[in-house]
Amino acid sequence: MENLAEVSSFIIPLILAITMHEAAHGFVAYKCGDNTAKAMGRVSFDPIKHIDLFGTFLLPAFLYLSHAPFLLGWAKPVPVNFNRLNNPRRDTILVAIAGPFTNVILAYISALLTHIDNFITPEQAPWTFANLYLSVKINIVLAVFNMLPILPLDGGRVLNSLLPPRIAYRHAKSEPYGMIIIILLFMLPSLKFAYYFIWLPADALRDVILHLAGIG
């Protein structure tokens, strides 16, 4: 039962974070002129429309329970036809940052909700507080990870939109290999990639969010 409670306190905030992240992409794309995600029902808070069994459940749970040095997971990407956006280069950036920005907002809200300790202590409601603490962590890590400047991540979309057209075209060709590149970077401990590009930025962002939430 303890393992079940531990997994659920991780999986629930993860599903919420991923669902809101993907729905935000689809919503902003719709507002910017592309109704692809809207027509496919992906502008939705229904997690079933976004989750990927392996990427959303099995892999993150395995990494978490095995105390892996990093967490990795994904959802089904929201389909966006970037050519249908009103201003493709500008709106691609807006669509891309919508997901990570939503995760930052969720982390902030979760941090604010820990103030319920004025009425009920973590010892009295350990599962509730575990969800809130992990929601802060998960949303921050998702925001930082997705802003890595590697396609097909959101940060890669932003970078591609900022590059001169000729260089952007060449950069776009790296997208099919992006996840392989990311996994290799994580697997090379000598680079300390996760430490410098995930955990350090995540710690800095967490400190800002906790400060704004009046914690610490």
Image (cartoon, rainbow, N blue to C red):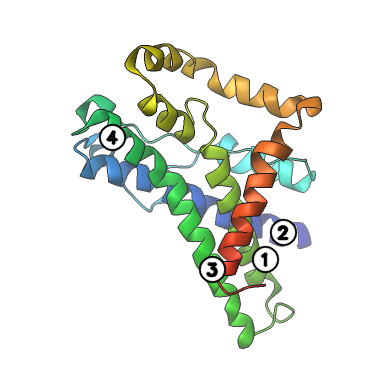
In the displayed structure image, the side of residue 180 where residue 82 appears, left or right = left
**Residue 63 visible from this viewpoint:** yes
Q: How crowded is mark 2: few (under 14 residues within 10 Å), some or many (20 or more)?
A: some
Q: Quadrant of the C terminus?
A: bottom right
Q: Do the residues labelled 3 and 2 touch (CB within 8 Å)?
A: no
Mark 3 residue type: Leu
Q: Do the residues labelled 2 and 1 touch (CB within 8 Å)?
A: yes
Residue behind mark 2: 6
Residue behind mark 3: 212
Q: Is mark 4 on a helix, strand or loop?
A: helix
Q: Estimate the x, y position of residue 187 in percent, counting from the top left.
A: 74, 26
Residue behind mark 4: 90
Q: Which of marks 3 and 4 is nearer the N terminus?
A: 4
Residue behind mark 1: 130
Mark 2 residue type: Glu
Q: Which residue lies furthest to the front in this view?
A: 164
Cα distance, mark 3 to mark 2?
28 Å
Is 36 located above or below residue 6 in the figure? above
Mark 4 residue type: Arg
Image-quadrant location for residue 120:
bottom right
**Residue 74 visible from this viewpoint:** no
Q: Which of marks 3 and 2 is nearer the N terminus?
A: 2
Along the line of sight, which residue is nearer the eye, 12 or 98?
Answer: 98
Residue occupying image coordinates x 31% and y 31%: 80
Is 119 located above or below residue 204 in the figure? below
Cα distance, mark 2 to mark 1?
8 Å
Q: Which of marks 1 and 4 is nearer the N terminus?
A: 4
Comparing marks 1 and 3, which lies closer to the viewer? 3
Q: Estimate the x, y position of residue 111 in percent, counting from the top left.
A: 57, 68
Q: Are marks 3 and 4 in contact (CB under 8 Å)?
A: no
Mark 1 residue type: Ala
In the displayed structure image, the side of residue 27 where residue 162 appears, left or right = right
